[in-house]
Image (tube, rainbow, N blue to C red):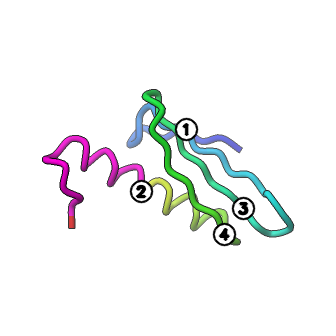
Amino acid sequence: MNEKTDQLNGWEFEVDEISANVYRVTGIDRKGRSVERTGTDPEMLLSECKADAMKLLARKAGDGVEPS
């Protein structure tokens, strides 16, 4: 399953079941930056990956310090 979001323009997220009830969610943007989470709840993993991507974008746009 692939999903693109307007909020994360240029990011694509993929959800794969890598074992019985174990999922890996990977997000990759056009510049090759990536985020990844593994666990048993694919919806939560997808949300966490999107949040990680937003933090990465905020850090790149700011002064290099992760927002609190």
Residue labelled with disc 3:
23
Disc 4 marks a residue whose amino acid type is Gly
First in residue order: circle 4 vs circle 3: 3
In contact (CB < 8 Å): disc 4 and disc 3? yes
Residue labelled with disc 4:
39
Disc 2 marks a residue whose amino acid type is Asp
Residue labelled with disc 2:
52
First in residue order: circle 1 vs circle 2: 1
Number of marks in picture: 4
Q: Which quarter of the figure has residue 19?
A: bottom right
Cα distance, mark 3 to mark 1? 16 Å
Q: Secondary structure at mark 4?
A: strand
Q: Which quarter of the figure has residue 12?
A: top right
Name which residue lies at 18% across and 56% down: 65
First in residue order: circle 2 vs circle 4: 4
Q: Secondary structure at mark 2?
A: helix
First in residue order: circle 3 vs circle 1: 1
In the depicted view, which residue is nearer to us: 34 or 41?
A: 34
Q: Is residue 47 magenta?
A: no
Residue labelled with disc 1:
12
In the depicted view, which residue is nearer to us: 29 or 2?
A: 29
Name which residue lies at 35% across and 51% down: 54
Disc 1 marks a residue whose amino acid type is Glu
Cα distance, mark 2 to mark 4? 15 Å
First in residue order: circle 4 vs circle 1: 1
Left-right relation of 26 to 63: right
> Whole-percent x and y of residue 20?
86, 67
For this orientation, the residue located farthest to the left is 63
